[in-house]
Image (spheres, rainbow, N blue to C red):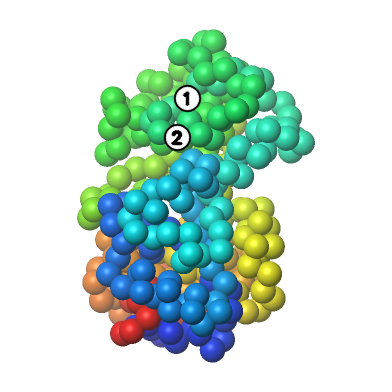
Amino acid sequence: MRMMESVAELADSHDGFVLDIWGVIHDGQKPYPGVPEALAEMRARGKRIVLLSNAPRRSWTVAKALQGMGLGSELFDGIVTSGEVSWTLLRDRTHPWFAKLGNRAFHLGPERDLSVVEDLPITLVSTPAEADWLLNTGPDPDRGPKSVEPYQPLLEECARFKLPMLCVNPDRAVMVGGERLICAGAFADRYLELGGDVMEIGKPDAMVYETVLSTLAVPAARVVAIGDTPHTDLLGAKNAGIDAVWAMTGLAADSLGPDPSSALLESEAARQHVTPVAALRSLRWAA
């Protein structure tokens, strides 16, 4: 697999860029080196950029966080999050799975994720016994983000009450400042093992790319998605029928090391059933 040193190598072949946020744009605390300059150069050359994230929060909250990192809205054309898509589905209730949900939810996750139900007729209850369904946005402060095991009794209780689980972040893990932490998708996996009914919203589901491609307004053949995670970013691009480039930052750097061989990348891509057109050292304009 070809390793690109600069995103500039994609400038002639692609006009629309779908960029993962956590793991490509920033590490959970600050932008990766060269990212602000790369985005500015891409915009100056007329490239269309949409940030696509499995963040279990509405897009406005992610935009606010990026602004705090010095990444203003002038650097991209839009943000689409799994939280925003989930909020819309909960509002409209036209999707069959969402149509059957009641209005009482038990929330598994931190309070900062509750924008996903803001301004909706949904009541958050304090125990699974009171709930119609389970809102899963990730680990909470009490049990921590290192392992699923502390959550096992709670997940078993929810399964006993046959609560459908809405998983608003299909990511299984994320890197935060160099540390690997679990995400909501890890709970979805365990809940499925318990026989639970799970709906995951976000990459790799092609549905979340509909808004992205509409916002880009670029022919699909000229669009490329850049992400660090095969299971979500690369598979999602494949499902949406667009090119994918594998970023060697975030989870890729953690699992594959700083300088993976072409053979290792090819082997791992085949194992994950994805077909990236190339790998990218990091989101920089100048190598």
User: Can you say whether 246 is above or below 182 in the image?
Assistant: below
Disc 2, SS: helix
Q: Earlier in the sequence, mark 2 or mark 1?
A: 1
Left or right of 278? Residue 255 is left
* Residues at circles 2 and 1 in contact by the CB criterion of under 8 Å: yes
User: Which residue in the structure is indicated by mark 2?
Assistant: 113
Q: Residue at x 63, y 67 (%)?
A: 216
- Note whether residue 192 is visible: no
Residue placed most toward the observer, 94 or 48: 48
Task: Give residue 73's mark.
Answer: none
Image quarter of residue 77: bottom right
Cα–Cα gap, marks 2 and 1: 10 Å
Q: What type is the residue that disc 1 sits on?
A: His
Image quarter of residue 97: top right
Residue 151 placed where, x, y %?
36, 27
Disc 1, SS: strand
Residue closest to the far bottom: 12
User: Which residue in the structure is indicated by mark 1?
Assistant: 107
Quadrant of the drawing holding the N terminus: bottom left
Q: Residue at x 31, y 85 (%)?
A: 287
The crowd level at tag 2 (other Cα within 10 Å; few <14, some 14-19, many 20+) is many
Q: What type is the residue that disc 2 sits on?
A: Asp
Q: Residue at x 72, y 26 (%)?
A: 100
Residue 254 placed where, x, y %?
27, 61
- Note whether residue 129 is visible: yes
